[in-house]
Image: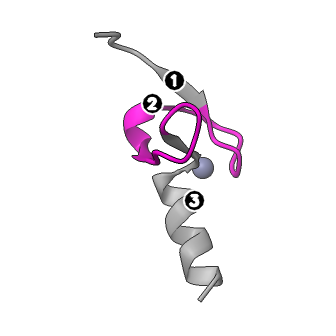
Amino acid sequence: MPAELKKVCGHCKKEKSLSDFYHNSTKSDYHSGICKTCQKDVNEKNR
Ligand SMILES: [Zn+2]
């Protein structure tokens, strides 16, 4: 199992560990395009 998988958040453009992204089976890499912090932010704005 790969130890350090990183992904750039599509929202804050910061490189974060995959564990900082929510699991999303609809995405090709099975992770959300934005990090947990940004996801929370977006969810609050989309209410
Ligand atoms: Zn982010």
- Return the disc, 1 or 3, that comes first in the chain's sequence: 1
Highlighted magenta segment, given as a residue range: 8-30
- Label 2 CB less than 8 angstroms from ligand 1: no
Label 2 sits on a secondary structure element that is: strand
Q: Answer whether residue 28 is magenta in the image.
A: yes
Number of residues whose C-alpha sits closer than 10 Å to that of mark 1, classed few (under 14), some (14–19) or many (20 or more): few
Give how far apart the Cα atoms at labels 1 and 3 are: 16 Å
User: What number is the disc on residue 17?
Assistant: 2
Number of residues whose C-alpha sits closer than 10 Å to that of mark 2, classed few (under 14), some (14–19) or many (20 or more): some
- Label 3 CB less than 8 angstroms from ligand 1: yes
Q: Amino acid at mark 2?
A: Ser
Q: Answer whether residue 20 is magenta in the image.
A: yes
Nearer-the-camera pick, 14 or 47: 47
Number of residues whose C-alpha sits closer than 10 Å to that of mark 3, classed few (under 14), some (14–19) or many (20 or more): some
Q: Residue at x 32, y 12 (%)?
A: 3
Give the x, y percent position of residue 14. Answer: 64, 37
Q: Amino acid at mark 3?
A: Cys
Give the x, y percent position of residue 26. Answer: 54, 48
User: What number is the disc on residue 21?
Assistant: none
- Return the disc, 2 or 1, that comes first in the chain's sequence: 1
Q: Count all numbered tags in the image, as a single digit.
A: 3
Label 3 sits on a secondary structure element that is: helix
Q: Residue at x 61, y 71 (%)?
A: 42
Q: Amino acid at mark 1?
A: Lys
Reading the image, the residue beneath label 1 is 6
Reading the image, the residue beneath label 3 is 38
